[in-house]
Image: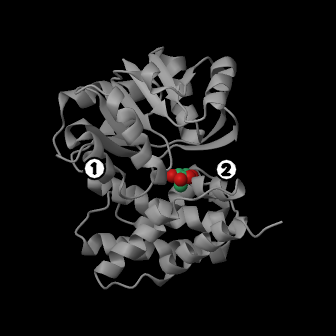
C-alpha cells in the first residue's frame, strides 16, 4: 500500500513514524517545502512518548511526481490549506486512490468532495494528541480512538485496508456510518479546548484545573452542543462537558494545536472551529456569545503577530 501523508506537522510525523515502524508500508511525506523535505529524508522522524522514543527513516519529497498513484493520501495540513493541497495532488491520484482527512474543524470533507469527488473521500477524527518539538520530531502526547467514514454513510470494502493500516500501527480505529456526527463530536471538543488554550497558553490538562478556564470551556461547549442539537446532529457522548474534560485529562501534557500555532505566530484554524460555530449559529438565529468572544480574541492574537517587537 502506498501511503502519502501531506504535511510534516505534529500529526503528520506521528502517523508516518508509527506506520513505518509497525508496518513498513511504502510511506511518503509530501511537504511543500523542498529543503525541509530533503532534511526529513536525511534525518528521518523521531517520536517521543511516555513509552520511550524511536526514530525511523522516511521517504519525504516536495515533488508530486514522486507520490504518483497512491492508495491512500492522508491530509495532515491546516484546514485553510486543504483546497490548495488537493488541487496540487489531484493529478497524481488514480480512480482507486482514497483521500482521508482527520483534520480539525468543519468543512474539509465538503472541499474534498468538490475537488476529488465524493467516491474518493474519507473523513473522520482522531483523539491522538501530538506536539511538534522540532523538524521531524514529535511528542505523542495523548491517545484515543480514531474513527473513519464517508459521506454516503455506507461502509465500503475500500475502507477496510485503511482501518487495518491504522490498527496495525497502534492507532485503535473503527469505521462509522455517521461521519458527520463523529466530526461534530470532535469539533465540540476542539471548541472547548483549542481557542481557550491558545489565549491562556495553558496545556490541555491545566485548562480544567483553573476554575476560570474550566467555566469558559463549559460555556463554549454548551453553545456548540446546543447548535448540534438544533441541527439534529447526535453527538456520540451524552455529556459534552464531561467528555471535553476527559479529553483534557487524557491529553493533559499536550499543547493544543492552536496553542502550538500561536506560539509559532502562525495562522490558526479558528475559522474552522469556534468561528464555524458562530457562523452556523448565526444563520439559524442562535446566539453563541462565548464563541464570538473566543473567535475575536484568537483573531486579535493573529493580528498582534505583526505588531509585536
Ligand atoms: O487540536 C488538538 O490539539 C487536538 O485535537 C486535541 C484533541 C484538542 C488535543 O490537543
Mark 1 = which residue? 179
91 or 128, which lies in front?
A: 91
Q: Quadrant of residue 272?
A: bottom left
Q: Position of residue 2 (x, y in %)?
A: 39, 19
Tell me the residue that label 2 is attached to. Answer: 253
Q: Is residue 39 above or below residue 203?
A: above
Return the x and y of residue 218 as percentages of the image width and height: 51, 74
Q: Residues within 10 Å of mark 2 (few under 14, many from 20)?
A: many
Q: Is residue 208 visible?
A: no
Q: Position of residue 107 (x, y in %)?
A: 35, 57
Q: Nearer the viewer, mark 2 or mark 1?
A: 1
Please report the residue visible at 67 percent of the width from the left and 59 percent of the height from the top. 262
Residue shown at the point (39%, 85%) measured from the top left: 287
Residue shown at 42% from the left, 60% from the top: 187
**Sequence-earlier tag: 2 or 1:** 1
| Nearer to me, 77 or 143 | 77
For the N terminus, give its image quadrant.
top left
Comparing 89 with 127, the one in front is: 89
Amino acid at each position: 500500500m502506498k501511503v502519502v501523508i501531506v504535511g510534516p506537522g505534529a500529526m503528520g510525523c506521528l502517523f508516518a513514524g508509527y506506520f513505518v515502524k509497525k508496518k513498513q508500508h511504502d510511506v511518503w511525506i509530501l511537504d511543500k517545502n523542498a529543503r525541509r523535505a530533503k532534511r526529513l529524508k536525511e534525518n528521518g522522524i523521531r517520536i517521543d512518548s511516555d513509552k520511550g522514543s524511536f526514530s525511523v527513516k522516511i521517504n519525504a519529497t516536495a515533488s508530486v511526481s514522486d507520490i504518483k498513484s497512491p492508495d491512500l493520501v492522508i491530509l495532515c495540513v491546516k484546514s485553510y490549506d486543504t483546497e490548495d493541497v488537493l488541487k496540487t495532488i489531484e493529478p497524481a491520484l488514480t480512480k482507486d486512490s482514497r483521500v482521508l482527512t482527520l483534520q480539525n474543524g468543519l468543512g474539509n470533507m465538503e472541499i474534498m468532495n468538490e475537488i476529488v469527488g465524493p467516491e474518493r473521500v474519507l473523513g473522520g477524527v482522531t483523539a491522538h494528541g501530538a506536539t511538534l518539538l522540532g523538524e521531524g520530531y514529535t511528542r505523542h502526547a495523548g491517545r484515543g480512538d480514531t474513527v473513519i467514514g464517508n459521506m454516503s454513510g455506507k461502509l465500503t470494502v475500500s475502507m477496510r485496508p485503511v482501518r487495518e493500516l491504522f490498527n496495525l500501527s497502534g492507532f485503535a480505529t473503527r469505521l462509522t456510518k455517521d461521519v458527520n456526527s463523529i466530526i461534530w463530536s470532535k469539533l465540540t471538543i476542539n471548541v472547548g479546548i483549542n481557542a481557550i488554550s491558545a489565549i491562556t497558553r495553558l496545556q490541555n490538562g491545566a485548562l480544567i484545573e483553573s476554575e476560570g478556564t474550566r467555566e469558559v470551556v463549559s460555556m463554549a461547549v454548551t453553545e456548540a452542543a446546543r447548535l448540534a442539537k438544533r441541527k439534529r446532529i447526535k453527538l456520540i457522548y451524552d455529556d459534552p462537558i464531561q467528555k471535553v474534560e476527559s479529553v483534557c485529562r487524557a491529553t493533559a501534557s499536550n499543547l493544543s494545536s492552536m496553542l502550538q500555532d500561536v506560539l509559532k505566530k502562525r495562522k490558526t484554524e479558528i475559522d474552522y472551529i469556534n468561528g464555524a460555530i458562530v457562523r452556523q449559529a448565526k444563520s439559524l438565529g442562535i446566539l453563541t456569545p462565548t464563541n464570538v468572544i473566543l473567535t475575536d480574541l484568537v483573531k486579535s492574537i493573529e493580528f498582534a503577530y505583526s505588531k509585536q517587537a
